[in-house]
Amino acid sequence: MGSGAGVGIGAILLILLIGGGVLAALRYVIRAALKVGNLASVLSGVIKKADFEAETTPKSLSSAEPLLMDRIKRDFPEYNPELIRQRVAKDAGTFYESAQAGKCLYTDGVSDQLKERLESYLPPDVAGNIQVHKVALAAYDDSSADRVLTFQAAAAFRDSAGTTRQRRLVLKYLAAWSTDTMTGVKRSNCPNCGAPIPAVGSEVCKYCGTALKVWAGTQWLLTDVRED
């Protein structure tokens, strides 16, 4: 009987040890599951925060205006940075208004080539609440006879699901003294001898020496606008 009792007690102890191990393992699994659950909750919170910031934070812009202004003023003494920024903001808004309407809404100051491109493609799913947060001058190309300004614009709109979409636009403008429906640009001629003025920025006619004052009539022709 003593031997049988010893075996019984040993079996009970073994069961308790095994049971304790199972319980310990079970506790470990539960703790791990809780940690995973907490991690999932944290990750979910991070994702939601990132989505919220993406919806509410305007896109960053690269401004080079302080570096470019001397060159621009050299070519265009009457250049008004504030007025051109207002123009760019309006054009950026019109881009998304066109997308919402499903057709190009630009009228004056836009090249025919750009109008044709926008008639065939505009950003999809623009439902409203169009905003232009900021505009920045990004580049000025004076390496050829033409002069081209490149701007960036931080814009936003609401899609059909009610989500706010933040976007960055790139808009390019060509200096044009007057527009031509065929070519988009028509060069000016010297008011004295009638010779063509070869380049934007010319201050004196190279044929007769007449001082040229054409800057007051300079227009900026929008030649390209697209999402970056």
Image (cartoon, rainbow, N blue to C red):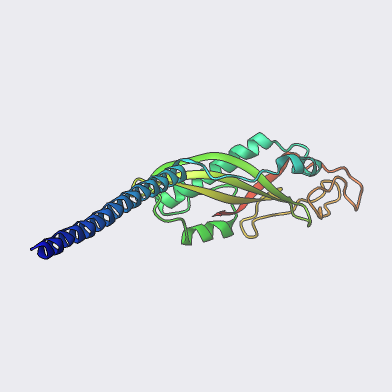
Residue 77 position within the rendered picture, expressed as x and y whole percent measured from the top left = 78, 38
List x then y, in percent, for residue 92.
54, 45
Left or right position of 144 against 97? right
Residue 9 lies in what quarter of the image?
A: bottom left
The residue that appears at 90% across and 52% down in the rendered structure is: 206
Farthest residue, direction left: 1
Residue 26 position within the rendered picture, expressed as x and y whole percent measured from the top left? 25, 55
Q: Which residue occupies the foreground of this view, 8 or 84?
A: 8
Q: Nearer the viewer, residue 42 or 190?
A: 42
Placement of 224 over or under 128, stated as above or below:
below
- State the image coordinates of residue 85 (x, y, percent, origin top left): 62, 39
Which quarter of the image is occupied by the N terminus? bottom left
**Quadrant holding the C terminus:** bottom right
Looking at this view, name the residue that lies furthest to the front.
2
Q: Nearer the viewer, residue 99 or 168?
A: 168
Left or right: 121 as drawn, with respect to 37: right
The image shows a total of numbered marks equal to: 0
Whether residue 132 sits left or right of residue 145 in the image: it is left
